[in-house]
Image (tube, grey):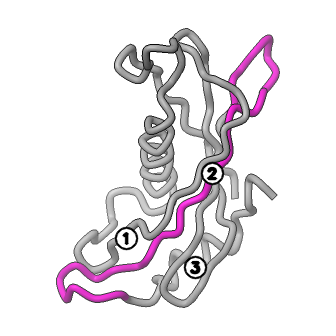
């Protein structure tokens, strides 16, 4: 399975007083990359109310600062699949002279959730099948 990396535009609002992307903004980038990832996998046929997700945990390891004019890509993978949860991992790279330099890595534990019934649910079989084909990007 070939997932196209997400390439967000770095906004001036993302930059802190030190001149680099604020640490909390990385979680927004992860969220945007995750939505880009899901759109590639399931497109517009996602029933959010029945097959929703909740974020249970986020982690970020910062390797290098990202600056306003940097061009970045975010790779998304699947690190673990449980019965009702799964862990997605991320690798943020800065493109420099056609090379990719790692700026950060991270992971999110996501819980499959049925919003209509307000309870956790098994990871949908369609998702599980797709996740099993998708390697971790940080291992």
Cα gap from disc 2 to disc 3, whole angstroms: 21 Å
Residue under label 1, please give it.
Answer: 53
Question: What is the secondary structure assignment of the residue under circle 2?
Answer: strand
Magenta-colored stretch includes residue 10? no
Disc 1 packing (10 Å; few <14; some 14–19; many ≥20)? many
Q: On the picture, is 73 further left or further right than 45?
A: right
Please state the extent of the stretch shown in magenta in the rendering: 93-120
Q: Which mark is residue 106?
A: 2
Cα gap from disc 3 to disc 1, whole angstroms: 14 Å
Image quadrant in which the N terminus is located = bottom right
Magenta-colored stretch includes residue 112? yes
Q: Which mark is residue 90?
A: none
The answer to whether the residues at label 2 and label 3 have Cβ atoms under 8 Å apart is no
The answer to whether the residues at label 1 and label 2 have Cβ atoms under 8 Å apart is no
Q: On the picture, is 16 further left or further right than 125?
A: left
* Residue shown at 82% from the left, 21% from the top: 99
């Amino acid at each position: 399975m070939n997932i196209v990396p997400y390439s967000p535009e770095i906004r001036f609002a993302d930059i802190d007083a030190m001149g680099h992307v604020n640490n909390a903004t990385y979680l927004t980038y992860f969220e945007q990359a995750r939505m880009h990832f899901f759109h590639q996998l399931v497109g517009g046929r996602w029933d959010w109310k029945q097959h929703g997700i909740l974020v249970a945990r986020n982690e970020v390891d910062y390797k290098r600062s990202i600056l306003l004019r940097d061009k970045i890509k975010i790779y998304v993978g699947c690190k673990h699949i449980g019965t009702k949860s799964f862990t997605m991992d991320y690798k943020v790279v800065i493109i420099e002279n056609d090379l990719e330099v790692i700026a950060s890595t991270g992971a999110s534990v996501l819980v499959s959730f049925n919003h209509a019934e307000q309870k956790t649910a098994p990871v949908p079989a369609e998702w599980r099948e797709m996740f099993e084909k998708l390697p971790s990007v940080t291992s």
